[in-house]
Amino acid sequence: MKALALPLLAALVAAPALSGCDSNDDNEDNFTVQFAALNGSGVTGTAELTMDDDDFTVEIDGEDLDATAHPQHIHGAPGGTVTAQAVCPTMADDANSDGFVDVLEGLPRYGSILLPLDDDISTQAQNVPGFPTGTSIDYSESTTMAALRAALVKDDDNGDDPIGTLGADGTIDLDNYVIVIHGTTDTLPATVGTLPGLPAAATLPVACGRIVRS
């Protein structure tokens, strides 16, 4: 793992088989996400993900967001277990009962950041200006499966930050992951947790959805 705002270089590794992907005649697998609002945001939206032998594409449409930047990520491996299924948090996960499920309270449910969904999804390096901004999201990015494997299927070199990997012997299994969208303009109480160096409003989860095979 690397710190949230710092690049994480992707090392070339051998390409393992995809886990849980039942290929059709075109060797293409399709997945969808139906987002649910978190923390009273009112956000709605959907996502479509497609992977085949060569390429990986993510498309996200979102509405009713605040007029700010919206970091968005594929999360997985909750509890450090790469085969555990990530789930979206609920208000029951508001451990300090301050009325918000902050990014730290959500991590045990949805797990580490596996892939930032910015303007370059070929690595785990986060380009903050490359995240969507504004009250709606109309997002589409693609990369190669070789680059995706290189970014994710390797050992984690920093277990103390929020970005994780699947291990050198891991497999990419989208059925185990969720997408989380962050970012609000609300004034939050000091009890709302955040990641080091980042304001709580920037990291507050405002929508989450499980990735489901379609």
Image: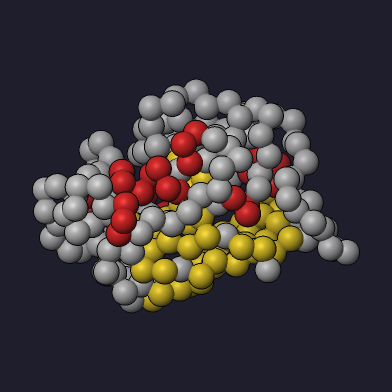
Numbered marks: total? 0
Image quadrant where residue 88 sits: bottom left
Look at the image and tell me whether residue 202 can be seen: no
Expressed as whole percent of the image width and height from the top left, the position of residue 76 reads 52, 45
Residue toward you, 151 or 105:
105
Q: Is residue 82 above or below residue 208?
A: above
Where the N terminus falls, by quadrant?
top left
Image quadrant where residue 69 sits: bottom left
Q: Residue at x 23, y 57 (%)?
A: 100
Where the C terminus falls, by quadrant?
bottom right
Q: Residue at x 39, y 59 (%)?
A: 181
Expressed as whole percent of the image width and height from the top left, the position of residue 63 reads 39, 76
Q: Residue at x 11, y 53 (%)?
A: 189
Q: Is residue 170 left or right of residue 64?
A: right
Expressed as whole percent of the image width and height from the top left, the position of residue 168 reads 65, 27
Q: Is residue 68 left or right of residue 179?
A: left
Q: Is residue 167 above or below residue 181?
A: above
Furthest toward the top, the residue is 157
Look at the image and tell me whether residue 13 can be seen: yes
Expressed as whole percent of the image width and height from the top left, the position of residue 93 reads 32, 52
